[in-house]
Image (cartoon, grey):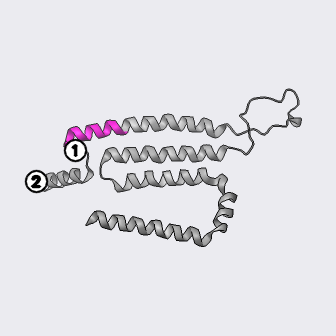
Amino acid sequence: MYQTSCSINFLSVVLCFEIYLELLGDLTTKIGIFYMHYWIYCCAVIIMTSGLFIMLASDNYLRKIIGLGIFQSAVLIFYIALAKIKNGIPPIDRCVADSNSCLYTYSNPLAHILMLTAIVVGFATFAVGLALIYRIYQQYNTISENEILLKETDRDESEC
């Protein structure tokens, strides 16, 4: 019964999306081509919201840490995409003597340097989170937030 209702819901979503594309027709094509260079920002936001959803919706601590990693990766992608300049090249000194007559447009390297630092900090955060999850597992024999809360309330009630 559940599989049938899920497949019906999925088919209705696909059908609605097809109708939406037919109604907009050429307008979506024109808008899509005009905004095509913004696709990386849309992808970063989608990945960011999926990581946030994983963090908020899951009761498993390991899944929460993985969601945090996904969220952080999306932020890195977003900031690196913001630093890219159209037709920009890496900031290597190609103008020899006179910087006023330089014909090149350089991309800003500051965002890339900061994101390298953020990758290191994210790795350290992930490692500390895994260590904390391991200690929680040793203490409670589970990494489910709901089960830990139940054990804590039972322990508090038995102390009273």
Q: Is 99 above or below relative to 70?
A: above
Is residue 3 shown in magenta? Answer: no
Viewport quadrant of the C terminus: bottom left
Residue 160 showing in the rendered view: no
* Dot 1 amino acid type: Thr
The structure residue drawn at horizontal position 75% and vertical position 38%, both measured from the top left corner, is 106
> Which mark sits nearer the N-terminus, 1 or 2?
1
Q: Which residue sits at x=44%, y=67%?
A: 13
Tell me the kind of residue under disc 2: Ser
Q: Residue furthest top?
A: 96
Highlighted magenta segment, given as a residue range: 129-142
Q: Position of residue 114 (x, y in %)?
A: 59, 38
| Mark in front: 1 vs 2 | 1
Q: Main secondary structure of the magenta part?
A: helix
Neighbourhood count class around disc 1 (C-alpha, 10 Å): few under 14, some 14–19, many 20 upward: some
Residue situated in front as seen by the camera: 124 or 83: 83
Residue 69: x, y in percent? 44, 43
- Label 1, on which residue? 142
Q: For this rendering, which residue is in front, 16 or 120? A: 16
Q: Quadrant of residue 109?
A: top right
Q: Which mark is residue 158?
A: 2
Q: Give me the residue at 49% from left, 70% from top.
A: 16
Q: Residues within 10 Å of mark 2 (few under 14, many from 20)?
A: few
Answer whether residue 138 is magenta in the image.
Answer: yes
In the image, 18: left or right of 7?
A: right
Q: How many numbered callouts?
A: 2
Residue at the far bottom in the pictured view: 23
Please, what secondary structure does the residue beneath circle 1 have? loop
Of helix, strand and loop, which one carries label 2?
Answer: helix
Q: Left or right: where does residue 134 sit relative to residue 20? A: left
Is 124 located above or below residue 21 in the figure?
above
